[in-house]
Amino acid sequence: AQSVAQPEDQVNVAEGNPLTVKCTYSVSGNPYLFWYVQYPNRGLQFLLKYITGDNLVKGSYGFEAEFNKSQTSFHLKKPSALVSDSALYFCAVRDRTGGFKTIFGAGTRLFVKA
Amino acid sequence: GAGVSQSPSNKVTEKGKDVELRCDPISGHTALYWYRQRLGQGLEFLIYFQGNSAPDKSGLPSDRFSAERTGESVSTLTIQRTQQEDSAVYLCASSPAPVTDTQYFGPGTRLTVL
């Protein structure tokens, strides 16, 4: 069965510091991996995805994520956090060997302090 | 261009009543998904449409839930005999193609069952 774990309910970081939001996954086959962000009073927006190729994926707003097959992780990173990055972040996975179900993690709230 | 729209934005109903939620996907998007997001939780997959067929409806929680889609256009999610545990935000997403493509989310319908 597919599953996604976001072990931190909240991540606090000072503006200008690097940030990491963690995600680990479990699928029976090889995964498609996604990060989405939900800003207050706004809908879910796509940030980035890993399909194949380079393990380091670059996305919107300066975010990037690294696919690590051995650790089954897909952590979201940004070198320098902005207050405007404060939002709810969701990791999602789909098993490429079958099915169309995308499994989302419970979400991690990022709070960037000025 | 126009994004995914959902109506109503808010729906308050009494326990036992039926409700119908509507989703208008982005024009040309063949794939359409419904999710449920309970307060403070992640997204829960409900159903996936490819065109007007539903190859994956494994997430529908009970036979009180049903969904249909007209061609590659509007979809409706119907909940019969609503229960208090149905209270949640119901999100719709569309995608140009299934599996690897980005999902574009609507603003959601907040359902409250009294």
Image (tube, grey):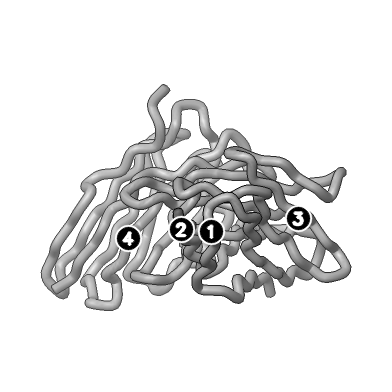
As drawn, the label of residue B89 is: 4
Image quarter for residue B40? bottom left
Mark in the foreground, 4 or 3: 4
Which mark is first along the chain, 1 or 2? Answer: 1
Distance between the alpha carbons at the discs numbered 2 and 1:
5 Å
Looking at numbered disc 3 in the image, what kind of residue is underneath it? Arg
Q: Decide if residue A96 is in sight here.
A: yes
Q: Decide if residue B76 is in sight here.
A: no
Tag 2 near tag 1, CB within 8 Å: yes
To which residue does mark 3 refer?
A: A96
To which residue does mark 2 refer?
A: A113
Distance between the alpha carbons at the discs numbered 2 and 3:
38 Å
Which mark is first along the chain, 3 or 2? Answer: 3
- Tags 2 and 3 both on a single chain: yes
Distance between the alpha carbons at the discs numbered 1 and 4:
31 Å
Tag 1 near tag 4, CB within 8 Å: no
